[in-house]
Image: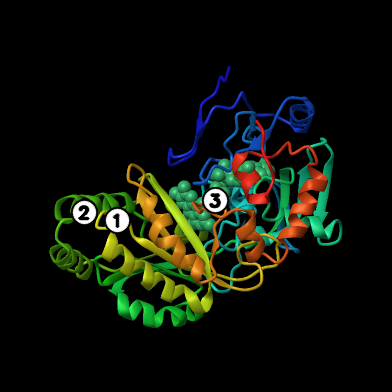
Amino acid sequence: MADVNWQNWSGHVRSTPQKWLKPKDMTELRDALRAPDGHVRMVGKGHSFTALAATEGTLISLDEIPGTVLSCDRNAETARLQAGASLNALSRGLQQQGLAFKNLGDIDVQTLAGATSTGTHGTGVGFPCLSAEMVEINLMLASGELVTASTTENADLLHAARVAIGSLGIITDATVSVRPAYRLHRRTFTRSLQDTLAHAMGSWRTHRNFEFFCLPFCDHAFNIIHDETDADSFGAKENSDSNAVMQLKRLRDLLGWSKPLRRALLNQVARHQKPEEMIGTSWEMLASERNNRFNEMEYHLPVDQGLDALQEVLAVIERQRRDVFFPIECRQTAGDDAWLSPFQGGPRISVAVHAWHEDSVDWFFEHVEPIFRRRGGRPHWGKMHSLTAADLRELYPDFERFTALRRELDPGGRFLNAHTADLWGETFGS
Ligand SMILES: Cc1cc2nc3c(=O)[nH]c(=O)nc-3n(C[C@H](O)[C@H](O)[C@H](O)COP(=O)(O)OP(=O)(O)OC[C@H]3O[C@@H](n4cnc5c(N)ncnc54)[C@H](O)[C@@H]3O)c2cc1C
């Protein structure tokens, strides 16, 4: 009989693992793997929207393994990091050493292993996803053997393990390319959607980090810019995201029946939004809290397709789905060469749609995903999509190399679950 209930952050994915193990050291971790029974999935903070960590077998998390920054080399600007530690704890640990991650996404509660396993990214044309910054990875295989993959040792494994969706082994720690600690000047402002789109490529070129959020039924977009500065810190980040989302929900509930009224009101609110600016520590400026639960689909599109895809998505939502109220996020990330990185081969523009956690996500698949797919998008591994091996093979030149290596390292399919078996084209029995 199952004895643990597990659910992801949004509550959309649930499973009942037989065991949820939290080993305290490598010996306990190896013992957990050597036990003969069933499938094993690793979980970080459960912030993926897909069933990546769901299992009826054994769930393993590394959050009781002590340590954050295990060592660092200030000259080489690298740090060896505990893979089960959160990006927030790691940022604090790095700061004590005068170091910092080069970039971060919208939040920093994810674990290093969880974030990198799905190709978690921020925004900025000069910055690849976090996985690409890993220069050495220590991995415990299904056999319990500990292997090291780096640019000089098992280089193929490094390229595969940087984004491996928990399918090659358990990442125990990784050496990550970092940089001296720095401060960022954060500016947020609304601008017409037309101007935001017209200037987007320029904004990405000019600013260290640029992203924007646009709203269905509104002609304005919320722009966020970060630039590096030596100036003193000022201002404090308010967690206004939650309030704004709740206001948008109320507006949808009250005025969803009238597109013109909704548009007029949203435009008026957007026009009166005051620009804000502040300066602070890099990780505090880049990452925010997200307190409203939602589900999400994000695709990474070729740069020449991204903004057109976004406009098509906005148009179809306005035509078909009055219930949608969450902002749509648009970012750009530099390319890398990890076999299954969505950014493999060149930079991509990412477009993300969200749905309130109690609302239906059927429109992601019915209306939005076909646009992303037609335009050559690759899905974020941790966010909702419907792709399986046959589709993924077309999108990733190194897909077969990855699946062959996966079979070699995990011949018994220990790390499979139903979802990842679909991704890799394997059959799955419980
Ligand atoms: C509110 C919110 C905001 C987000 N913002 C962003 C964003 O700005 N940018 C972005 O790209 N993504 C974003 N995401 C997605 C998120 O970064 C990814 O889904 C990430 O994988 C979650 O990390 P986690 O630690 O929760 O991992 P989990 O979701 O728990 O696991 C993710 C994968 O990692 C594997 N894994 C976990 N630990 C290990 C290990 N030790 N060894 C091997 N494999 C392991 C799991 O098996 C699974 O396959 C966001 C998600 C949420 C909910």
Residue 229's place in the image compared with 133, above or below, is below
Q: Tag 1: Cα neighbours inside 10 Å, few (<14), some, or many (≥20)?
A: many
Q: Earlier in the sequence, mark 3 or mark 1?
A: 1
Q: Position of residue 105 (x, y in %)?
A: 51, 58
The residue identified by callout 1 is 324
Question: Does the residue at mark 2 contact the one at mark 1 (Cβ under 8 Å)?
Answer: yes
Q: CA distance from mark 3 to mark 2?
A: 28 Å
Residue 159 visible in image: no
Q: Where does the image place residue 118, in percent across and percent down from the top left?
A: 60, 53
The residue at the point 65 percent across, 67 percent down is 344
Residue 224, given in percent of the width and then of the height, sits at: 39, 68
Quadrant location of the C terminus?
A: top right
Q: Secondary structure at mark 1?
A: loop
| Residue to which mark 3 is pinned | 382
69 lies above or below 224: above
Amino acid tagged 1: Val
Q: Amino acid at mark 2?
A: Arg
158 lies left or right of 129: right
Which sits in the foreground, 127 or 331?
331
* Label 3 beta carbon less than 8 Å to ligand 1: yes
Q: Earlier in the sequence, mark 2 or mark 1?
A: 2
Residue 62 seen anywhere in this rendered image of the structure:
yes
- The type of residue carrying mark 3 is Gly
